[in-house]
Amino acid sequence: MVVGASDETDKEIIEMSDWLYHELNAQRVYYSSFDPVKNTPLENKKPENPWREYRLYQSSFLLRDYGFEADDFVFNDNDRLNLKQDPKFLIAKEKELIVDVNDAEFQELIKVPGIGLKTAQKIIDKRPIKNVSILKSVGVITKRAMPFIEINKIHQTRLSKWLN
């Protein structure tokens, strides 16, 4: 999809991508930021911000690999993604996600920012998780994950709670 050549919104693009993945079983959706070419009908159209393409790719991977749906995404008043923040983070924040790393299923763990597909499986294999250093050792990006996780029903309010 060429992003920004017409007046499509990110919401429309994500809905189309969701449909391509889940109805047509597409393996991958590609995005390209519009960049005008001289001596063409769109030569005076403004080029698209490359961050928009990047955020759409992130969203696409969440749809394809992480089980998110188009309705999960957070958009601004113009149905655009926030270019300054990761879509997975915004979804978790919007849903007030809190997951206990010792009880959560794989599908729940991969919804947490800072936890990817391989890392979620490593968490499951390493259980019980007793502290944040174990999370770091299996690859959790703790700076992203901490607001959304609990360890043994304790939600981090201070980092020192989990240092033991």
Image (cartoon, helix red, strand yellow):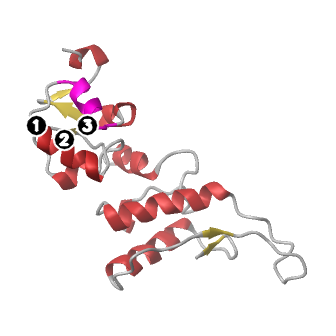
| Magenta-span inclusion, residue 156 | no
Task: Assign a secondary structure to mark 2.
Answer: helix
Dominant secondary structure of the residues highlighted in magenta in the image: helix
Q: Are marks 3 and 2 in contact (CB under 8 Å)?
A: yes
Name the kind of residue labelled 3 in the image: Val
Check disc 1 and report the residue beneath it.
Answer: 127
Q: Are marks 1 and 2 in contact (CB under 8 Å)?
A: yes
How far is mark 3 from mark 1, CA to CA?
11 Å
Check disc 2 and report the residue beneath it.
Answer: 123
Check disc 3 and report the residue beneath it.
Answer: 138
| Magenta-span inclusion, residue 137 | yes
- Observer able to see residue 158: no
Mark 1, Cα crowd under 10 Å, few <14 / some 14-19 / many 20+, is: few
- Observer able to see residue 24: yes
Q: Tell me: 109 left or right of 64.
A: left
Which region shows up in magenta?
Answer: 131-140
Name the kind of residue labelled 2 in the image: Ile
Q: Tell me: 70 left or right of 163.
A: right
